[in-house]
Amino acid sequence: MLVVMRSQATEEQVRDVCRKIESLGLRAHPIPGAQRTAIGITGNDGAVEPGSLEEMPGVGEVIRVSKPYKLVSRDIKPDNTVIKFPNSHVTIGGKDIVVMAGPCSIESREQAMIIGEIVSRAGGHFLRGGAYKPRTSPYSFQGLGEEGLKIMAEVRERFGLLIVTEAVDNESLDLVADYADMIQIGARNMQNFSLLKRAGRARKPVLLKRGMSATLEELLMAAEYVMSEGNYNVVLCERGVRTFADHTRNTLDLSLVPAVQRLSHLPILVDPSHGTGKRNKVLPMGRAAIAVGADGLIVEVHHDPDHALSDGPQSIVPAQFETLMCEIKQIAAVLQRGVVAPVNQAGSLLAAQASSLPAAAR
């Protein structure tokens, strides 16, 4: 059920409707839009009687939502969601494209600083890097844990980049929420429902990656789990699915982008690194992702990928990342979009601290 408020409805009228919904033993989810506020209703086993709500002041109409994903659907919010971050000009989901880049794993402070400078200088917006790594083999590098989070926080302080990193369980999620600007839920955990609920109770935006064999509806329902707990700042990510193909690590399903945008108001990014597993395919598929309408990219960048502790074969080198940034700007312009202004051109922390950087880092 969806309650659509009138465009002139007051905040008090919205609160009154929410209180009425909650008095019925249900949960209200007010989601402001560009023109009006919609209030999603969850927690009902069957149909909700609309009569008592339709007559309340400020209510425009009450609509039955047939889709299993209510809060994720464009039925509740026709205009696109734009995710904002405190004390930053960076947004996800608007007219401009965002780029997240960095190593698969944070291996050391030196490595993170080198790559942080590379990402910032090329115009990236987020440092992506794993402090907790769910690996296929228990003997593979599992990440530095909280020490990795501390290193990424230091990179943010020096270069002004936002931080996105993966949480693998409830304990790590609490730490990630303390250190990072955005919590990543990886493909292996897309249907870890207790973790999704915990992310929904966090107050940091969530990057939700598509599972390795997940359908579109399963991805949207996973996002619904997060939003049903009150966290409406969710970004979806296509990162490839398993098919019969053997020329790539996964099959990058770019058709998911327009499919999501037809059904949902949530932003969607594309990960061509995991989506292909091949360094020589990352740039072509990254370009294609922007051309098909993605709201941004998340790519793996490493200054010495042959010696990376994880995912070296799919990590692009700095020169390739710089090329990719130039190319996506040109593609975005054709689509009447842009790329979010680089950190060092937005009067942010990097500019303020430039004079304190070592000469080699300037």
Image (cartoon, rainbow, N blue to C red):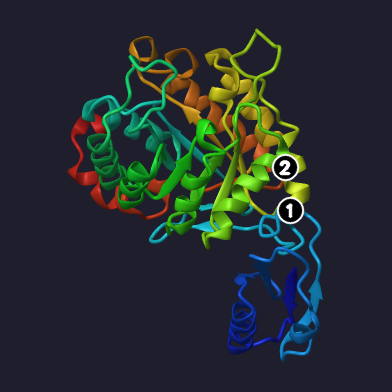
Q: Nearer the viewer, residue 268 or 50?
A: 50
From this view, report whether residue 138 is shown above or below residue 232: above
Can you say whether 70 is above or below 6 in the image? above
Q: Does residue 96 appear in the picture of this structure? A: no
Name the residue at 38% across, 28% down: 133
Residue 146: numbered disc:
none
Q: Is residue 319 above or below residue 56?
A: above
From the viewer's perspective, is 92 left or right of 105?
A: right
Residue 305 location, x and y as percent? 39, 14
Secondary structure beneath label 2: helix
Q: Where does the image place residue 293, in percent across and percent down from the top left?
A: 70, 41
Residue type at the position of mark 2: Glu
Determine the secondary structure under disc 1.
loop
CB within 8 Å, label 1 to label 2: yes
What is the quadrant of the N terminus in the image?
A: bottom right
| Disc 2: which residue | 217
The amino acid pointed to by label 1 is: Pro
Choose between 27 and 116: the one closer to the eye. 27
Give the residue pinned by disc 1.
68
Q: Residue at x 22, y 36 (%)?
A: 147
Task: Tell me the quarter of the image containing the C terminus.
Answer: top left
Q: How dense is the environment of label 2, judged by Cα within 10 Å: few (below 14), some, or many (20 and up)?
A: some
The residue sitting at 74% across, 62% down in the picture is 78
Q: Residues within 10 Å of mark 1 (few under 14, many from 20)?
A: few
Q: In which quadrant of the rendered view does residue 361 lie?
A: top left
In the picture as drawn, the residue positioned furthest to the front comes out as 45
Residue closest to the eye, 154 or 229: 229
Residue at the location (71% across, 61% down)? 79
Q: Is residue 215 left or right of residue 150?
A: right
Up-down relation of residue 25 to residue 106 (above or below): below
Asked if residue 222 shows in the view, the reply is yes
3D distance between C-alphas at marks 1 and 2: 9 Å
